[in-house]
Image (tube, rainbow, N blue to C red):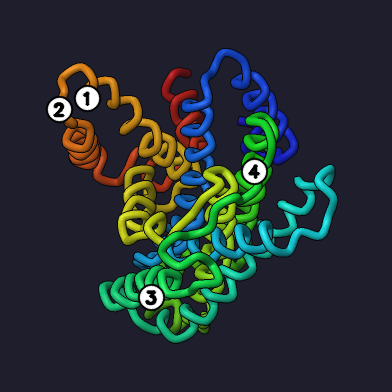
């Protein structure tokens, strides 16, 4: 439980895990683990808007695409440091990717977050599709062919460590924000927007702040995805990617950071864990079983795996019950 309150300890634990997994784990499983870190970032960032602030965004794939293309293009065209300092350069470009997505989040959020519910969902969905179609028609970023030759972060331990740094930054940034006056403002918007306005809270400003911070980390997730795959094209950021992010948030629990992480790992690993079933039966039943598992989970746990609790809250409840 101490790791949840200490960024350095959390980072050390993840570093040990990364170097430990480098032995006896094949390249395919390593790639799945790297994709899991991307999905963890994506789900935590969306949880800030959909979970803590109570809005309904369906355009997170658009912000992810902006971050991915910014970092990929910058890495292939604007390299300014020697190869020995590739990780430093990558960190700078990933920050730039997050900032580019945050600017887009501000420009989209300022007018659209005056809307509520289904209307906001439609606007954000439209934004995600606009970004995808725009990328299809931009020749300087490859158009439908996409961008290839994107530099990686090196060997698996370094790539996992790099992603872990961003996971820790994301987790503790959102954790700090939610335990500040801004976090209380976000929660007040979620619980009763009219009452929050009556108390003098600028609800639109609160929603835009949450949207911008969420967009930043979605852009970072996109940048990591680009460097892990070494190739991206617009089809990597379809509406289904946004839906996947929403599923992770709902499955983990609206307003639970650790729930988002656990759900992201499940959503990433489960389809691949079911792959041997296809080889055994000759029929691709993976998505059927995957969908049934999600439906069953939501019937048994309608508020998600963790609800609005963190793992530390669950642990305290367990200890009190055992005492």
The answer to whether residue 184 is visible is no
Q: Considering the numbered disc 3 on the image, is that residue within a helix, a strand or a loop? A: helix
Q: Which residue is mark 4?
A: 152
Gap between marks 1 and 4, in whole Å? 31 Å
Q: Position of residue 164 (x, y in %)?
A: 64, 39
Disc 3: CA contacts within 10 A as few (<14), some (14-19) or many (>=20): some
| Residue 172 relative to residue 36: left or right | right
Q: Which residue is mark 3?
A: 130
Locate residue 54 relative to residue 103 in the image: left or right.
Answer: left
Disc number at residue 283? 2
Considering only order in the chain, which callout, 1 or 2, is on the residue closer to the N terminus?
A: 1
* Identity of the residue drawn at 45% across and 50% down: 43
Tell me the residue at 39%/39% (across/down).
263
In which image quadrant can residue 219 be found?
A: bottom right
Quote the CA–CA distance across marks 3 and 2. 36 Å
The CA span between labels 1 and 3 is 36 Å
Instruction: Tell me whether the residue at label 2 lies in contact with that at label 1, contact meaning CB atoms closer than 8 angstroms.
Output: yes
Query: Judging from the image, what secondary structure is the residue with disc 4 in?
Result: loop
102 is higher (above) or lower (below) than 85 = below
Q: Position of residue 61 (x, y in %)?
A: 42, 61
């Amino acid at each position: 439980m101490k790791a949840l309150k200490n960024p350095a300890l959390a980072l050390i634990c993840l570093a040990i895990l990364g170097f430990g997994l480098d032995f006896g784990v094949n390249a395919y499983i390593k790639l799945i683990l790297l994709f899991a870190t991307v999905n963890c970032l994506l789900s935590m960032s969306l949880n800030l808007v959909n979970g803590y602030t109570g809005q309904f965004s369906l355009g997170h794939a658009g912000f992810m695409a902006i971050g991915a293309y910014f970092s990929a293009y910058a890495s292939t065209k604007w390299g300014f440091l020697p190869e020995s300092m590739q990780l430093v350069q990558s960190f700078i470009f990933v920050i730039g990717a997050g900032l580019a997505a945050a600017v887009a989040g501000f420009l989209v959020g300022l007018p659209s977050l005056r809307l509520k519910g289904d209307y906001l969902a439609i606007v954000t969905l439209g934004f995600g599709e606009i970004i995808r179609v725009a990328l299809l028609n931009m020749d300087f970023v490859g158009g439908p062919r996409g961008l290839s030759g994107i530099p990686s972060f090196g060997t698996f331990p370094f790539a996992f460590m790099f992603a872990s740094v961003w996971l820790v930054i994301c987790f503790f940034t959102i954790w700090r924000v939610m335990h500040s006056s801004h976090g209380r403002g976000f929660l007040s918007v979620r619980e009763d927007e009219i009452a929050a306005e009556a108390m003098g809270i600028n609800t639109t400003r609160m929603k835009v702040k949450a949207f911008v911070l969420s967009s930043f980390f979605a852009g970072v997730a996109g940048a990591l995805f680009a460097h892990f795959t070494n190739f991206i094209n617009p089809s990597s950021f379809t509406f289904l990617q946004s839906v996947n992010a929403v599923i992770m948030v709902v499955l983990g629990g609206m307003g639970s950071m650790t729930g988002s992480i656990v759900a992201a790992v499940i959503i990433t690993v489960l389809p691949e864990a079911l792959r041997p079933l296809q080889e055994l039966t000759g029929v691709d039943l993976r998505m059927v079983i995957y969908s049934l598992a999600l439906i069953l989970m939501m019937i048994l746990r309608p508020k998600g795996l963790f609800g609005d609790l963190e793992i530390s809250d669950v642990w305290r409840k367990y200890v009190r019950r055992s005492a």
